[in-house]
Amino acid sequence: MKKFFVALSLLLVILSFAAKVELVFWTHEDPNRTPLEEGYIKEFQKMYPNVEIKRVTYPSDKIKEVLLTAFAARKGPDIFNIEIQDEYPYIVNERVAPVNLNALGLKSYNDLKNQYLEGSLDAVTYKGKIYGLPLELTNWCIFINKKYFRDVGLDPEKDYPKTWEDMVRISEKLVIRDGQIIKRRGFDFRYPYYLTFFVPMVEQLGGALFSADGKTAIINDNAWIRVLDFMKQWGPNGKNLGSPTYTAARKEFNKDNNTVVMCESGLYQIDRIRTENPAFYNSNEWMVVPWPVFKNAVRDVKSNYYGHYYMVNAESSKEEQEWAWRFINFMLSHPQDYLVKVGLIQPRKDLIESDVFKNYPYSDVFLEDMEKAHIVPLHPQGPQIEQLIREAVESVMLTNTSSRDALNTLKRKVNDLLKEEQ
Amino acid sequence: MERKKAIWGFVFTIPAIVFFLIFDFYPVANAFWMSFFKKDLLSLNPPKFIGFKNYTYLFTSEAFWNSVKATAIFTFGTFVPMVLVSLALAALIITRKRFQKFLQMAYYSPAVLSSVVAAMIWLLMFDPRGLANQFLNYFFNTYGVDYHWLSNENMLRLATIIVYFWKYVGYFTVIFISGMASIPRSIHEAAIVDGASGWQDFRHITLPLLKPTTLLVSVMSMIQCLKTFSTQYLFVQGGAPRGPIDVITLNIYNTAIRDHQIGRASAMSVILFFVIMFFTYLQFRVSRSEEVSY
């Protein structure tokens, strides 16, 4: 009898191990998010002891290539997230699985869509199916260090830049140079994310990246040239207010070390300031204002927003896919934690309507801008197009190339790329 | 008996051969094969055979020829001064009676550093507010001039050359030192007894007998320069424009990883492979005719 029980318990142990589902979860490094999600993993594993989740982080500029090579070798993780413009080819190439509604306890995609702000799942909707759930949607507003505004006789509450023309004028007042070398920038753009900030500037003036049918690129030359001229004026060969070769403005901003007065960034920047420089965070010397528009803008468009969506590998087993979606759903059922502890906005209606969101510093500024924005252009060749825009902008900023010549080159190359794709 | 030894000799080399076949030969052969196909890295569709289209595309591509130009400028701009300076440094160090080992170590130390770390350090120096501008302003007695290390086409090329030069000059110096040390002392002594000056000894004894080492260093450094990647990659990540430093390896990386075009990237790798092979062949050919005996 004793032997029988020993054999039975041994069998049970073996079976429990055999039935264990192991999920591999790759995500980008975010020191504020790691403890939060590690906690969720522990909770989830406690609820479901048959599931083991291995969370692996990579630097945000590395994860794209690691993930791509893993998927190319058909060894991708079960769960991952990268920026939506880089995730889009995974959807188009059917490398990710559609959301499993059963795992989420929902009956239809409409039930799922009803949980989120209108349009926030459009980016991951392909041929009628939804392929991801948003970890965050991020748009950029302008962060201002009030102290340096006052130093030059400006009132940050009233004199903050409302238009791009204001941005130039104010930056000229704020900039400190040692000869040609900028010691303090008034503001600087967030190079090289040209799809996020440059394209909406073009759209403000009536231009567009793609035609309505998506077959032609670079619409309305005049708008493109005006923005290229603006960037030329901004760069070292113009008014010398900033350049892609200086350290990223958003990183300098947190240090409060008199090297940059304004930067463009997402709501998460607030949490980064708190972590990196608590004294500055608590000083009440920073504020956030809406993203500017051109004085003669024909469209009131704000910085494009981008998102990180959690996705599931289509080559994982059905059982792994189901558990992966359950786990993703479990993590995303804590949107307030993500906001308060990490500064990430999950576009869920319950979060946006909550007091926690309403009371979060500057959430209203970001939300109002987001309502006037749209997601970054999604295209299988998106990263190549962004690189070509980068080449055009930097050629006018850093060399003597005229805006017309840069635009002609850009137009030819992007349209060649689209033809090749067709 | 000899035959038995030979068989055992072969048996012992099998692990190395297997290792070579799996990790060297297979990737090279696969790249050759893939270069005739159109294949998106993410697509599950089978690769489409397109013959030589990847090659014809590359030979008519503006971006590819720009990469050839960037690679050629970088290679010749780096390896010529590298060979000359490392030779001069080796001659200088080997004639020192004291601190010889220390100097060798000091010059060699950057080669131990990872390329990524080296590029990061230099990126900080080339920042408009960094040491490079301060040094040139001091040197030329100018005030606040931005020499546009990371934005001006030529300065950017020079910046990548400086990083590479700094990193590898010590490595080749050490190779030259070992070459010089292998020249029998008696030959130098005979020349001195015959009344040769230090310069004459270097010019007529050391240099001719050092030819195989010089050749080895020049070919090695040239091949190394042709394969340069991390410096250019990190400079572009750090905000520098890609065009002037878009060397072939960087183009291969972007074509494969950013554009997902693994067939086209393979074709570029094959072209680079043949270029490197040509220089290696040249090394074998010339070194055979330049063998020296004492």
Image: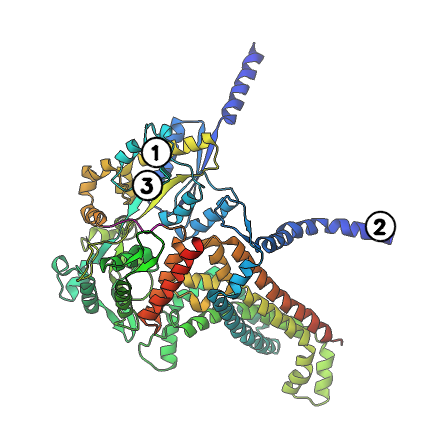
What amino acid is labelled 3 in the image?
A: Pro
What amino acid is labelled 2 in the image?
A: Lys
Q: Where does the image place residue A1, in percent across and percent down from the top left?
A: 56, 9
Say the numbered circle drawn on residue A329: 1
What amino acid is labelled 1 in the image?
A: Asn
Q: Is residue A377 magenta?
A: yes
Given residues A121 and A298, the one toward you in this image is: A298
List the residue tagged with mark 2. B4
Helix, strand or loop for disc 1:
helix
**Which region is colored magenta?**
A373-378
User: Residue at horizontal 39%, vertical 72%?
Assistant: B149
Q: Among all residues in the image, which is located at the extreme right? A: B1
Residue A79 position by quadrant: top left
Would residue A250 be visible to someone looking at this image? no
User: Residue at horizontal 18%, vertical 46%?
Assistant: A364
Is residue B84 found left or right of A148 in the rendered image? right
Q: Main secondary structure of the magenta part?
A: loop
Looking at the image, how many numbered discs can be counted on the residues? 3
Q: Where does the image place residue A223, in percent across and percent down from the top left?
A: 26, 63
Q: Where does the image place residue B167, in percent across and percent down from the top left?
A: 51, 67
Q: Chain of mark 2?
A: B
**Nearer mark to the viewer, of 1 and 2:** 1
